[in-house]
Image: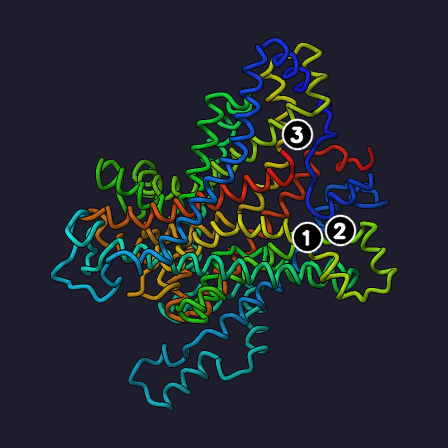
Amino acid sequence: MSSVPVERAPAPPGEVRERAERGESPLGRLTGSPLVRLIVRRVLVAIPLLLAISVLVFVLLEAMPGDPARNQAGMDATEEEVEAVRKSMGLDRPAHERYLSWLFGALTGDLGRSSVSGLPVSQLLAERMPVTFELVFLAFVISLGIALPVAMLAARKPGGVFDRIVMVGSMTLLAVPNYVLALLLVIVFAVTLRMLPSIGFTPIEVGLWPNLQSVILPTLALAIPLGCFYARFLRGDLVEQMNSADYVDTARAKGLGPWRILWQHAFRNSSFGLLTIVGLNVGALVGGTVIIEQIFAMPGLGQLMLQGVGARDTAVVQICVFIFAAVAVFANLFVDVMYAVLDPRIRYGGR
Amino acid sequence: MAVADTTTRALLSPTIGVERSIRWARIRKRLVIGVPAAIVVLLFAACFVGPYVLPLPAPIGGDVLNSSRPPGTPGHPLGTDVNGNDVLSRLLHGGQASLIVAVAVNAIGLIVGGLIGALSAYLGGKADTIIMRALDVLIAFPSLVLTIAIAQVLGPSLPNTILALSAFSIPGVARVARSSTLRVTSMPFVQAAALGGSPWWRTLLFHIAPNVLPQLLNFAMLGMGIVIVTEGALSFLGLGIPAPAPSWGNMIYEGQQSLSATPLLVLWPSLALLLAVLSFNLLGENVRDEMSGR
C-alpha cells in the first residue's frame, strides 16, 4: 500500500474531493479516528436525503390515478361500503398525517399490509429481496470479472488488435438495451440450444445448480452491458495513466515489467475512478432488475413493485421504490468512504 | 516517453509512410464523426420521410388473416406481425415515436436543466445549495424506477412519456451546466460584462450561455441513446407509447409473446434500436473527443 504514489488519483466525489484538494483532512481539525467521523458525517447527510426521497415517493403515489379504497372494496361495492373500506385503510385522514404514521410505522418495523394479497409487507419483502439481491450481486461480480482482465489486456497494447476488438465489441454491446439482450440470450440458450430455462426462478433450497441455471440468463443480461461500460472506462483510464503519469516513467526506469506496472501501479490509481463509476451505476443496476425480472418472471423486488404499481398497492410500492433509491444512496456513501480507506492522503489528512 | 517513442519511430520509418499515416489520421478524424452523423440523418429521413414516400401499408389496422408472413412477402418487405400489420411500416412509424421522444426529452432537459444549472451556479450561496440538494434526490433515484412511477401517474401516451423521461434527463444536464457555468463565470470577460453594467440575466444569457452551450449539446447527444433505450423499456412495460400505435419498445414486447415461433419480429425493432443508439453514442463520444482536443 505504501510504495504507490497516488498523485494522479482521479478526483474523489463531493466533499472528500474538495477537502483533499485543499490539502485538508476530510474531518477538519477534529481528532480521533478520521474514518469513523467521516462515516458518521456521510450517514448524517444521507438521512435527510432518504427522508426527502420517501416524501417524493409518497407525493407521487398520492398523485396516481385511481382510488385504492374502491379497488379494495371491489367493483360492485356501494358508496357506503367504499367509505367503510376507506376508513379501515386510514385513507380518510389528511395526507401528511398518513405519511407521518407510515414513517413512524416504518421506523418501528411495521410496513403495513399489501392491499392486494393482505400479507404483511415485511413478509413480502423477506420473500422477494433475496431474489433481487442474488441477481444484483452476481451481475456485479460477473461484470467486474469481465471488465478487469479485458481492460488490462486491452490497455497493455493500446491500438493493438485485442484493444480494437474490445473497443468495437464493447461499443456495440453497450448499445444493446438489457431487455433486448435478455431476449437474444433466451433465443440462443433457451429456445435454440435448450440448455437453460427461459423463465422462472428456482430457489436455492431446491439445489445450487438448478438455482444457478435459473439465474444465469437474467444475470448475464444485466452484467454484460455493465461489464462493457466498466471495461471501456478502466481501459481509457489505464491508457492515460500509462502515457502520462510520472510514476509510470519511474517504474519503467526501475526496470519493472509492463504487466507489473499495469497491475501494481496504473491499476491502483485507476481503481479510484472505477470505484466512482461502479458506485454511480449501482442505481442503474438495481433499476435494471425491474425490467429483467419482468422478462424472466423472477419473483423479486422489481416484479413486486411493478405488480404493486398496476394494482395501486401503495404500501408495497412506497417501500419498494424507497429501497431502490436507498440502495443507490448507500452505494454512493460507500464509495465516498472507500476513497478514504484507499487513499492515505484522505485517511491521514494532509499530504 | 510516449512522445519520444513516436518521434523515434517516425524518424526511423520512411517519410512516405508517415505522410500517408498523417493523411489517414486526418481522414479518420472526419470519418469517425461523419459516418455516425450520416447514419443519424438517414435514420431521421427513413422514419419521417420514408412512410410517406414508400408504398407501405398503414402501421395499424392490419388483417389478422394476413398475420405472421415471412420477410419478402409481396407488398411486405419484412413480412407482417401477429396482427397482420406490415413490419417495415411499423418499424418506421415506431422510429418516429422513438426519435420524437428522444429529441423532445433532450430539448426539455437541455433548456430546463441548463437554466437550472446555470442559475444555480450564478446565484451561488444558499440558493445553489438548495437546488443542488434537490437535484441530488432526483439523481439518487434509479432513473427507470422514477420514470415508471411518473409514467404510471400520468398514464401512457406520447406527451406523457416525454414528460416522465424528462424528469431524469434534467438533473444530469443541470449538473453539467452548473459546473461549466462555474468555470466560465470566473473568466475575465464575465467580470468585464458585469463591470460594464450588464444586468445579471443579460450576463447569464448573452455572455455565459453561449460558452456553456457546446458542452451541453454534446451531453444531450450522448443522452439521445439513453432516452431511446429507456423509452423502449417503458413501452416494453406498457407504460410508454400505448398499443396499437407502434414504437420500437412495444414492438419488441409484442414480438416477445411469440418469441420461439417468430424470433424475427423481435429482431427487427431490436436492430433498429441498436443502430440508432450505436450511432448516437458514437457521434457523441467522437464529438466529445474532438472538442477536448484528443
Q: Which amino acid, mark 3?
A: Asn
Residue A139 appears in the rendering: no
Mark 3 — on which chain does it sit? Answer: A
Above or below, comparing residue A210 to residue B225 in the picture: above
Q: CA distance from mark 2 to mark 1?
A: 8 Å
**Residue A142 in the image: x percent, y percent?**
45, 35
Q: CA distance from mark 2 to mark 3?
A: 30 Å
Badge 3 element:
helix
Residue at 34% over, 51% down? A298
Badge 1 element:
helix
B167 relative to A41 in the view: left or right: left
Residue at 20% over, 48% down? B262
Q: Which mark is residue B212?
A: 1
Q: Are marks 2 and 3 on the same chain?
A: no
Mark 2 or 1 closer to N-term? 2
Q: Which amino acid, mark 1?
A: Val
Mark 1 — on which chain does it sit? Answer: B
Q: Residue furthest left?
A: B65
Crowd band around label 1 with a 10 angstrom C-alpha radius: few (<14), some (14–19), many (20+): many
Residue at numbered disc 3: A269
Which image quadrant is residue A290 in?
bottom left
Residue at numbered disc 2: B184
Mark 2 — on which chain does it sit? Answer: B
Of residues A160 and A318, the one nearer the viewer is A160
Whether residues under marks 2 and 1 lie with C-beta atoms below 8 angstroms apart, the answer is: yes
B82 relative to A248 in the view: left or right: left
